[in-house]
Image (cartoon, rainbow, N blue to C red):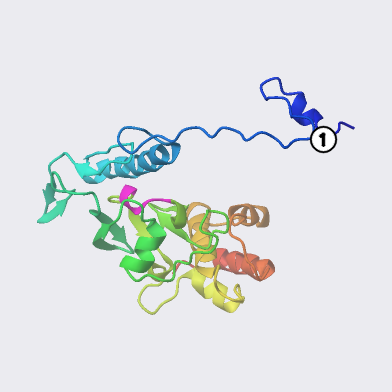
C-alpha cells in the first residue's frame, strides 16, 4: 500500500513535499472582477434565466438577456389580444407575463413568473389545490394533470410554455355534483388511504381509459407505474381502475 506521501509525490505537477514540513499552500485562482470578468456562477445563473425567458417567446414575450448576469430587459413590443396585453413593455424588467390557459374548460389569463411551474400556478394563482406536489422532481406522480389529454408532471413544466393548452385537474373530473367513473370507482373500492397521491392516480387512470377503455391488469399496472403511493394501497387502486373500466360511460 502506498504511503501518505505517494499520492502527493507521484503527481509531477505538484511540488515535492519538504521533508518534515507541512504541505505548501496551494495558490488559489484569481477571481474575475465585477467590471468585466465572468464567473462560472454568473454564467450559469444568466444562462438559466435566458432559457426561462426563451420559453416566453410562444406567449409574445421576446427578451434580450445578458447571459453574464446583467439586467433582463425586454427588447420587443407587446401584443394585445382581445384587450389582454401579452409580453413585457420595451425596456422593463421581465418579471411577469400573461399566459392563456384553458383549465377545466374555463379560459384563464394568468400573470406568471418565467420560472413558475404549472403546479405552482394551478395551486397558487388559481387556487386549484387538488393538484399535489410531492417529490417536486417528477418522480412520484402526485402532481399529474392532463395537458391536451396527455398526463404530465406539472411540477416540472413551466406554466409560461403551456400557452393555449387545455389543462384538466382533479377538480375538473366531476360534472357538477356527479363524480366521474374513475372518481366513483376510487370511492367504492377505497383506492386511497392518506389521499395525497389520489388526484394524480385518478388523472393517470382517466387518461388511460380515454385511450384504452378495456385495459388488462398488466396495462393498468404499466400505465400507473409512475404514480407512487406511500401508503402502498396499490391493490385497491388497481381494483378501482378495473371497476371504472367496466362501468357504463358517465
In this view, the residue farthest toward the front is 20
Instruction: Left or right? Give the position of 162 relative to 4.
Output: left
In this view, the residue farthest toward the right is 1
Instruction: Left or right? Give the position of 58 relative to 149.
Output: left
Compared with 115, 110 (above or below) is: below
What is the x, y in percent for residue 228? 61, 61
Compared with 4, 95 (above or below) is: below
- Pick the quarter of the image with the C terminus: bottom left
Between residues 28 and 120, which one lies in front from this camera angle? 28
What is the x, y in percent for residue 112? 28, 57
**Residue behind mark 1:** 4
Residue at 50% across, 32% down:
29
- Pick the quarter of the image with the N terminus: top right
Residue at 24% across, 46% down:
59
State which region is magenta.
Answer: 157-161
Q: Is 158 in the magenta?
A: yes
Residue at 51% across, 63% down:
200
In the figure, residue 126 lies in which quadrant? bottom left
Q: Is 150 in the magenta?
A: no
Amino acid at each position: 500500500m502506498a504511503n501518505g506521501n505517494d499520492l502527493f509525490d507521484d503527481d509531477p505537477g505538484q511540488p515535492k513535499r519538504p521533508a518534515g514540513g507541512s504541505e505548501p499552500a496551494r495558490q488559489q485562482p484569481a477571481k474575475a472582477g465585477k467590471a468585466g470578468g465572468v464567473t462560472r456562477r454568473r454564467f450559469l445563473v444568466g444562462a438559466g434565466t435566458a432559457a426561462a425567458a426563451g420559453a416566453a417567446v410562444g406567449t409574445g414575450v421576446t427578451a434580450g438577456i445578458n447571459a453574464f448576469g446583467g439586467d433582463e430587459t425586454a427588447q420587443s413590443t407587446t401584443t394585445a389580444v382581445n384587450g389582454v396585453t401579452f409580453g413585457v413593455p420595451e425596456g422593463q424588467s421581465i418579471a411577469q407575463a400573461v399566459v392563456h390557459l384553458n383549465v377545466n374548460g374555463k379560459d384563464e389569463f394568468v400573470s406568471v413568473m418565467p420560472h413558475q411551474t404549472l403546479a405552482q400556478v394551478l395551486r397558487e394563482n388559481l387556487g386549484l389545490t387538488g393538484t399535489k406536489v410531492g417529490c417536486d422532481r417528477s418522480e412520484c406522480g402526485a402532481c399529474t394533470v392532463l395537458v391536451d389529454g396527455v398526463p404530465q408532471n406539472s411540477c416540472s413544466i413551466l406554466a409560461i410554455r403551456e400557452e393555449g393548452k387545455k389543462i384538466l385537474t382533479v377538480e375538473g373530473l366531476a360534472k357538477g355534483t356527479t363524480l366521474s367513473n374513475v372518481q366513483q370507482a376510487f370511492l367504492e373500492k377505497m383506492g386511497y388511504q392518506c389521499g395525497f397521491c389520489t388526484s394524480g392516480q385518478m388523472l393517470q387512470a382517466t387518461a388511460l381509459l380515454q385511450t384504452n377503455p378495456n385495459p388488462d391488469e398488466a396495462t393498468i399496472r404499466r400505465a400507473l407505474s409512475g404514480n407512487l403511493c406511500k401508503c402502498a394501497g396499490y391493490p385497491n387502486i388497481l381494483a378501482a381502475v378495473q371497476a371504472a373500466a367496466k362501468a357504463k360511460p358517465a
